[in-house]
């Protein structure tokens, strides 16, 4: 079912506002101005900026999963080679889409565990499915590697997949939000740290 054009316009304006000022500083008034829509009209579609933040999150997650599916369709070689290629492709995507990764980090901080907010049921279910998009792809790649003998694992596969996806995601958010600070504090390029993490994963999983 197609999205209402005004809802789409408001969500797109929200993406821009959240990128420019962050979720915390954003207001429905600022978003309404960016949308070119009155606040009264805004509230017909969304009750709060928190509702909009979740809608933007779902939009970004869907884009992220579509990009991953496209990356996955182009992978070649043994399982371990596919895993390495996929991880580096994800890094490239994160670099090219820093605004999205920054938003994800801002979202996680704003809606941290202490924040009291109830997500509508359908949106929550859609988000839950989208969050597992990465898990499904990584699981498939690792299972290919286990079957062709190029990957060995010492951990439960669910734990391994969750660790890879969460650690790399958090790493990516940290770089997007604090790239200059990380460079100054560590005296190394943040993306090189990301690549080092990828090499550590591949070296630990590769069958020599």
Image (cartoon, rainbow, N blue to C red):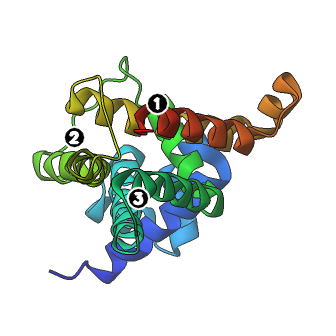
Write down the residue under mark 3.
82
| x and y, in percent, of residue 85 in the image | 50, 59
Residue at 57% from the left image edge and 68% from the top image edge = 34
**Horizontal side of residue 120 vs 52, given as left or right:** left
Return the disc, 3 or 2, that comes first in the chain's sequence: 3
Tell me if I can see residue 110 in this picture.
no
Q: Nearer the viewer, mark 1 or mark 2?
A: 1
Vertical placement of 171 versus 23: above or below?
above
Q: CA distance from mark 1 to mark 2?
A: 39 Å
Separation of marks 1 and 3 at Cα, in angstroms: 15 Å
Mark 3: few/some/many CA within 10 Å (<14, 14-19, 20+): many
Q: Is residue 201 left or right of residue 76?
A: right
The answer to whether residue 46 is left or right of residue 206 is left
- In front of the other: 86 or 170: 86
The 10 Å Cα crowd at callout 1, few under 14, some 14 to 19, many 20 or more, is: few
Query: Which residue carries the number 2 mark?
Result: 119
Q: Position of residue 115 (x, y in %)?
A: 37, 23
In the rendered view of the protein, which quadrant contains the C terminus?
top left
Callout 3: helix, strand or loop? helix
Element assignment for label 1: helix
Query: Is the residue under label 2 in contact with that under label 1 (CB below 8 Å)?
Result: no
Q: Which residue is mark 1?
A: 204
User: Which residue: 66% across, 44% down?
Assistant: 176
Secondary structure under badge 2?
Answer: loop
Residue 177 position in % (x across, y down): 67, 39
């Amino acid at each position: 079912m197609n999205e209402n054009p005004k809802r789409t316009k408001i969500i797109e304006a929200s993406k821009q506002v959240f990128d420019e000022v962050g979720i915390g500083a954003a207001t429905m008034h600022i978003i309404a101005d960016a949308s070119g829509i009155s606040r009264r009209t805004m509230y017909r579609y969304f009750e709060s900026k928190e509702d909009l933040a979740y809608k933007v999150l779902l939009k970004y997650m869907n884009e992220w999963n579509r990009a991953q599916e496209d990356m996955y369709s182009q992978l070649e070689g043994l399982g371990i080679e596919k895993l390495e290629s996929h991880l580096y492709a994800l890094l490239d995507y994160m670099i090219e889409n820093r605004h999205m990764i920054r938003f994800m980090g801002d979202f996680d901080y704003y809606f941290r565990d202490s924040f009291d907010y109830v997500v509508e049921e359908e949106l929550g279910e859609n988000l839950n499915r989208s969050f597992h998009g990465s898990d499904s792809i990584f699981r498939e790649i690792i299972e290919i590697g286990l079957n062709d003998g190029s990957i060995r694992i010492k951990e439960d596969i669910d734990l391994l997949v969750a660790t890879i996806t969460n650690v790399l995601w958090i790493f990516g958010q940290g770089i997007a939000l604090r790239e200059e600070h990380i460079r100054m504090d560590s005296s190394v390029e943040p993306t090189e740290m990301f690549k080092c993490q990828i090499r550590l994963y591949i070296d630990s999983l590769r069958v020599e």
